[in-house]
Image (spheres, rainbow, N blue to C red):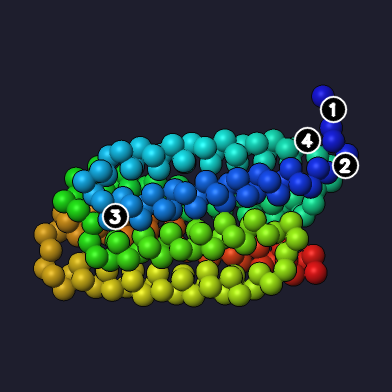
Amino acid sequence: MRLSLVPKEHDYFRLFSDLAANLDEAAQLLVRFMEDYGHAKSLAAAILEHEHVGDKILHDIVKRLNKSFITPIDREDIYDLVATMDEVLDNIEEAVDEMLLYRVQGPTEYARRQAHVIGEAAHVLHQIIDDLEKPTDLMDRIIRVNSLENEGDRISREAMAALFDDEMDTREVVKWKDIYDALESAVDECEHVANVIESIVLKHK
């Protein structure tokens, strides 16, 4: 097996962008899923397909890491970046899967709001990662992702409080708590991605 001693930097950054684009598309499908629940099954299937595509891109990046002695950014940062993006997508798919599995009648207003937060955060991350090879003026967008995570936290707290304020059936409370947890985790992991990128940028200034 021939190992590459010279990094093909553009190939790495292209794969990062492919992974970010795939995540962005899945996040926009999540927004549609919440807004057009009549087509929930077909939209969930499309999200699952994006999850499979993301897994393949992640595998390709890890395989490349194992073959290269030199990488354009620190090896652990590459793995953290791509694994965390994968976590965002896994949580999106989990929330959608749970809504169908639990046979909920439709999304709550909190679920719709959280989906929009995830959609915007994923889109901003896509823009950031597209510019990562030649990073300039990324901090405003990183801060925007941090702000979106704060907004997601507020929505999550409101959603949890409403579960008990509305005297919902216990089974419904359990269902929605799982769904809200998955959505909140997706938002949290978006911020984690932004933090990893910030660390990468500061190291390579």
Q: Quadrant of the C terminus?
A: bottom right
Mark positioned earlier in the residue sequence (4 or 1) = 1
Q: Are marks 4 and 2 in contact (CB under 8 Å)?
A: no
Measure the alpha-carbon separation of dots 4 and 3.
Answer: 41 Å
Q: Earlier in the sequence, mark 4 or mark 2?
A: 2
Kindly report the distance in space between the C-alpha atoms of the residues bearing marks 1 and 2.
12 Å
Give the residue type that dot 3 points to. Met
Pick whichever of labels 1 and 3 is earlier in the sequence: 1
Where residue 150 sits: x, y (%)? 45, 74
What residue is shown with label 1?
A: 2
Q: Which mark is residue 34?
A: 3
- N-terminal label among 4 and 3: 3
Q: Is residue 102 above or below residue 197?
A: above
Where residue 158 sits, quadrant-wise, is: bottom left
Circle 1 SS class: loop
Res 178 seen here: no
- Which numbered disc, 4 or 3, marks the residue closer to the eye? 3
Compute the Cα span from label 4 to label 1: 8 Å
Residue type highlighted by circle 4? Lys
Q: Residue at x 58, y 70 (%)?
A: 141
Residue 159 appears in view: yes
The mark closer to the camera, 1 or 3, is 3
The first of marks 2 and 3 along the sequence is 2
- CA gap, disc 4 and disc 2: 11 Å
Residue 67 is marked as: 4
In this rendering, the label closer to the viewer, 4 or 2 = 2
Disc sitting over residue 6 in the figure: 2
